[in-house]
Amino acid sequence: NSEGAPDVRPMGIAIPYNDKLYFVAAKPMNVFKQLEADNKVSISAYDGEKFLRLYGTAVLEDSEETVNTFLGMDEKIATMFPADIMAPFYLKDVTASICSFTEEPEVYNF
């Protein structure tokens, strides 16, 4: 990665909550600092047949209610992200495309 350029990172936690899609970072980590400086994100996934691409804006939502809800969802989350460092982000202004090698892309905005 170049100085000041965004970095690509694996994100192992995606949480649908309150009609939004969240991911979690840790406040002491570089990814959190980078999202504070530039909150535009791109996310991609592949299930063996189709690709999902999401483009949007990450919004920090670290209210006590959200943090406690996520801590109670999964022991893995509670172990990796204690309440004092958990930084839950949800996506807004999202464009999602579902693509394959053989079909036209499906595009959704939300």
Image (cartoon, grey):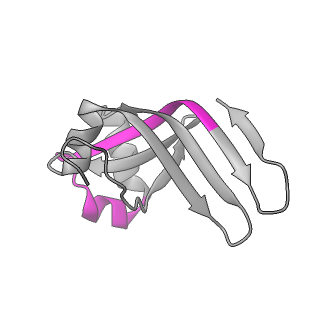
Q: Which residue is drawn at 50% across and 50% down?
A: 43
State the image coordinates of residue 14 (x, y, percent, origin top left).
49, 53
Q: Is 42 left, or right, of 102 in this rendering?
A: left
Q: In which quarter of the image is the C terminus?
A: top right
Going by the image, does 33 lie left or right of 11? left
Outermost residue, bottom direction? 48
Residue appearing at x 17%, y 45% in the figure = 84
Q: Is residue 95 above or below residue 68?
A: above
Residue 77 x %, y %: 34, 60
**Residue at image coords 42%, 48%:** 23
Q: What is the total number of numbered labels drawn onto the structure image?
A: 0
**Magenta-tinted stretch:** 74-95
Q: Where is residue 38 in the image (x, y as percent from the top left)?
A: 31, 32
Q: Assess whether residue 81 is covered by the magenta stretch.
A: yes
The outermost residue toward the right is 103
Asked whether 25 or 56 is in front, the reply is 56
Q: Give left or right: position of 69 versus 44.
A: left
Question: In the figure, residue 73 lies in which quadrant?
Answer: bottom left
Foreground residue among 99 and 22: 99
User: To which quarter of the image does residue 78 belong?
Assistant: bottom left
Q: In the rendered view of the protein, which quadrant contains the N terminus?
A: bottom left
16 versus 77 height, above or below: above
Quadrant of residue 8 within the rendered picture: bottom left
| Residue 48 in the figure: left or right of residue 101 | left
Nearer to the camera, 68 or 108: 108
Direction front: furthest residue = 2
- Can you give x and y, in whole percent of width and height, for residue 93 in the image? 55, 26
Q: Which residue is drawn at 41% across and 62% down?
A: 74
Q: Does the stretch in magenta take in 35?
A: no
